[in-house]
């Protein structure tokens, strides 16, 4: 299969929307990472996602919609979920709710819930409006590997396995959405941290007079993607530390949180930096590109500094992804 990269022209967007309606796969940008999209109401099309990514069938998909009205056609919303959708959509927040009968079982891995979000990226929104169908879209990369934040990243892993990639440039956020289980409207659970913090969720609900507990203990079932202990992993074994040393074995790649000032550190060829300024926003945006670049160098191992305390919601999200990435200890 030849993979075609499309520029974001009106004609190309119309072609890609038609391809999605026809059951084809399209990798497209969102504000978080690139997603591999299929018509969420077409079980056969969604099965192609699992095949292309080599994704296990027990890992459910997030469904992308234009707005709350479209989401309510797919899931049973409660008041808390509606408040959060109105406060944070479009944006990097996914809500897990009881699904309606029209959602294919393959999308939810046979479970009674579905994860939904409304993306903020203008190209993703345009495709959704043109396609006129909800889109199931996990990250557009081989299952378990580092997520893609550029079209080139998508091609690195899926060229020849999918027909279409929409090139929308680099993703603005750079890490996947916050996922919240809202099946119990009085007790919300953050299943995966992201750019939207638990405090922001609580504040949005409190402003509407809702007193809701927001916790972070995961459910026993995998209700949404990206929750496995081993995920987002480079091929090179990754170790996390609070503080990395600027000197060391040249066969070990070192990823620092912030740019080093010393001349020796700047000259070292085995060292990488997540942020020039110490900004968690910048670090999130560069995280996956840096992991990919370090992985491509063929080091025996990688060492990466965690986000420091006080880095906020994005720092928590970065550390979550790094912890899961470090769960893979062997090449493969």
Image (cartoon, grey):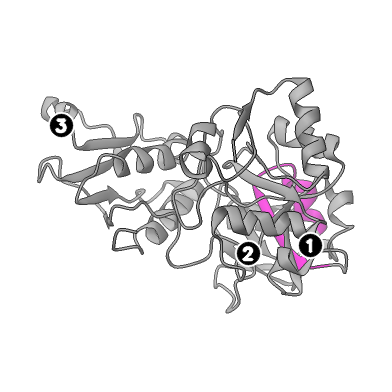
The residue located at (36%, 43%) in the rendering is: 291
Q: Quadrant of residue 286?
A: top left
The reply, left or right, for residue 22 in relation to residue 123 is: right
Q: Residues within 10 Å of mark 1 (few under 14, many from 20)?
A: many
Instruction: Give the position of the C terminus as an image quadrant.
Output: bottom left
SS assignment at label 2: loop
Residue of label 3: 268
Q: Nearer the viewer, mark 3 or mark 1?
A: 3
* Residue 94 at x, y percent in the picture: 68, 55
Q: Is residue 43 at least partly visible in the picture?
A: yes
Q: Is residue 50 above or below residue 14?
A: below
Look at discs 1 and 2 and give the one toward the viewer.
Answer: 2
Q: Mark 2: give few (<14), some (14-19) or many (20+) Cα within 10 Å.
A: many
Reply yes or no: does residue 98 show up in magenta: yes
Element under label 1? helix
Mark 3 burial class by Cα count in 10 Å: few <14, some 14-19, many 20+ = some
What is the CA distance from the residue labelled 1 to the residue labelled 2?
A: 19 Å
């Amino acid at each position: 299969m030849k993979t075609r990269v499309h520029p974001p022209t009106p004609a190309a967007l119309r072609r890609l929307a038609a391809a999605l309606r026809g059951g084809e796969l399209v990798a497209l940008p969102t504000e978080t990472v690139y997603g591999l999209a299929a018509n969420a109401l077409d079980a056969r099309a969604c099965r192609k996602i699992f095949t292309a990514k080599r994704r296990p069938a027990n890992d459910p998909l997030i469904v992308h919609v234009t707005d709350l009205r479209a989401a309510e056609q797919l899931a049973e919303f409660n008041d808390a979920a509606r408040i959060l959708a109105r406060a944070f959509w479009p944006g990097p927040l996914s809500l897990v709710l009881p699904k309606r009968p029209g959602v294919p079982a393959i999308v939810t891995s046979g479970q009674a819930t579905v994860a939904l979000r409304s993306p903020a990226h203008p190209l993703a929104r345009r495709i959704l409006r043109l396609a006129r169908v909800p889109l199931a879209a996990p990250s557009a990369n081989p299952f378990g590997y580092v997520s893609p934040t550029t079209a080139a990243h998508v091609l690195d892993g899926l060229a020849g396995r999918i027909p279409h990639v929409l090139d929308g440039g680099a993703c603005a956020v750079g890490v996947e959405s916050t996922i919240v289980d809202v099946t119990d409207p009085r007790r919300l659970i953050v299943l995966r941290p992201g750019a939207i913090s638990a405090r922001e969720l609580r504040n949005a609900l409190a402003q509407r007079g809702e007193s809701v507990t927001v916790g972070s203990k995961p459910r026993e079932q995998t209700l949404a993607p990206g929750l496995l202990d081993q995920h987002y992993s480079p091929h090179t074994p990754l170790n996390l530390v609070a503080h990395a040393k600027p000197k060391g074995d040249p066969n070990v790649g070192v990823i620092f949180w912030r740019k080093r000032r010393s001349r020796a550190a700047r000259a070292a060829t085995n060292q990488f930096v997540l942020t020039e300024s110490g900004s968690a926003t910048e670090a999130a945006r560069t995280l996956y590109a840096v992991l990919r670049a370090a992985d491509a160098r063929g080091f025996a191992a990688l060492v990466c500094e965690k986000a420091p305390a006080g880095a906020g919601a994005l720092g928590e999200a970065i550390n979550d992804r790094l912890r899961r990435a470090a769960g893979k200890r062997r090449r493969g």
